[in-house]
Image: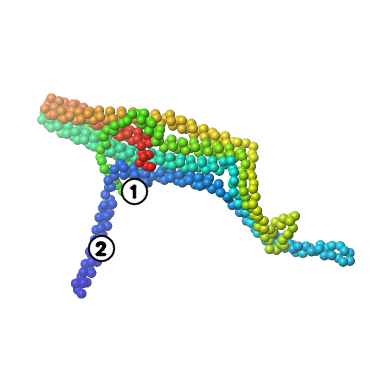
Amino acid sequence: MIICSRLIKAAWIIVPAFAVSMLMAHAARASEPVVLGLEQLIQMALDTSPEIKEAEQDVKAAQSDLAQAKGGRWAQLELVATMGPAQNASEPIVAVDPVTFKGKLEDRDKNELGFFGRLDLAIVQPLYTFGKISNRIDAAMSGVEAQKAARLKKQGEIILNVKELYYGYIVANQGAAVAKDADGFIQDARKRIERLLEAGARHVSPSDLYRLGAYEAEIESFKFKAESGARLAYLALKKAVGLPDRREFRLDTQVLPMEIKELADQEQYISQALDQRPEFDQLKSAISAKKSLVRAAKADLYPSVFLAGIGSFAGAPDREELDISYFRDEFNHLEGGIVLGSAWHFDFGISQGRLEKARAEHLKVLHTKEFAERNIPLEVARHYQDCLEAQASFQAYEKAAVASRRWIVAAFSNFDFGVGTAKDMFDSIEKYGKNQGDFLLSLYNYNVSLARLSYAVGEYRSSLQ
């Protein structure tokens, strides 16, 4: 028994301790930055973007318009129920006086109030409307397709935005690393100058340290800007993908991609854009919708034929029913029937004005399509040329950056041997920093240009549908 009690006490200590340790381990794992790649970031942005959710609601709204338009094909029921006071009334009695043989009307109405209830209904089934309903259904169906294309376009914009932020964050970090690298060269140069000054070397002077201080301030300023830009890019990317404020992340790479993409002919990209851009699908659907609305507005100028079932039911308990075919008893009756009818609305310019407006909106969308057909090829050509220019630029600056680094090594060696000056070291460091900066900027422009070209031709469409 003593042993059992000791085991129970030990369990009361070990089990909570184990649970606490597990919770602490889980919290530690949760606080670790998650590693994310470009594709993961894009998917997260698409899943959490409020703009995509807004576009999805536009699709649902268009689908609701379609449901309403289709509902116009079927019968519609209208009910009107009323209740109110009614004066009590009994049938009058004609009394015959046997002496004078004259009739006498005896009024039995006591001038009291009762109540009545009434229900009127009409079930109307359209038979032929000259296209009022069918054209509006076609317009609504095209509206749904237009909103789906708009949602697809928005998804492409989100993908492009994430790519730009992704590359911007990487280049900002690399820029800070270049500034740190250049600062290391400056500190190395300071040590060499101070050492040679103490040794009394003739090719060095105290003014070299002053000049060095000016370079230090410039590099420190660039370093601060790069780090500030990296923090801002990190926050922007984090918000774009919908990560919580307390959830940190890091990228799966620290350097910009340098792979060269073999580009096809420019005309091929233009043809691809005209075929795949969702804007054209959106415009085609919008044109179809506006054309159908023109037909619907024209159909409104003609009558509509319908079949209707009508009925009216009324009752007043304190009024006797007047069962005479020549007179309708509004308080006590039971009526119903089926009729064939036609409705034709006439006005002085209102319907014609609506038709002209529909025609104008149809022509407006046609001109919008023409504008897109003219400008999207120019957009594709601009991004295509930007890719070629950025590729040539970053390849050239890559060679320059390697050469300037070798220049630094040579300038430092010559300075140590007394055959070079401090100015040579400063010039090599400055040129190295500039070439590295230009290289990173052109490499960033190359990757962004590829992303923009991909967006311009609608390549993202195949991965989303």
Inter-mark Cα distance, 1 to 2: 30 Å
Local packing at callout 1 (Cα closer than 10 Å; few below 14, some 14-19, many 20+) is few
Question: Which residue is under mark 2?
Answer: 16
Q: Residue 322 occupies which quadrant of the picture?
A: bottom right
Three-letter code for the amino acid on which mark 2 is drawn: Pro
The residue located at (35%, 44%) in the rendering is 45
Q: Say if mark 1 contacts mark 2, CB within 8 Å.
A: no
Position in image of residue 269 (x %, y %): 36, 31
Q: Which mark is residue 87?
A: none
For the question of whether residue 396 can be seen, the reply is yes
The residue located at (62%, 54%) in the rendering is 121
Label 2 residue SS: helix
Residue lying farthest to the bottom in this orientation: 1
Of 187 and 44, nearer the camera is 44
Classify the position of the N terminus by image quarter: bottom left
Position in image of residue 374 (x %, y %): 43, 29
Of 364 and 29, nearer the camera is 364
Three-letter code for the amino acid on which mark 1 is drawn: Pro
Q: Residue 387 occupies which quadrant of the picture?
A: top left
Question: Which residue is under mark 1?
Answer: 244
Q: Report the side of 237 relative to 56 (left or right).
A: left
Local packing at callout 2 (Cα closer than 10 Å; few below 14, some 14-19, many 20+) is few
The residue located at (59%, 46%) in the rendering is 127
Q: Report the side of 88 relative to 367 (left or right).
A: right
**Could you tell which of marks 1 and 2 lies nearer the N-terminus?**
2
Position in image of residue 311 (x %, y %): 64, 54
Q: Residue 225 occupies which quadrant of the picture?
A: top left
Residue lying farthest to the right in this orientation: 99
Label 1 residue SS: loop
Position in image of residue 19 (x %, y %): 26, 60
For the question of whether residue 176 can be seen, the reply is no
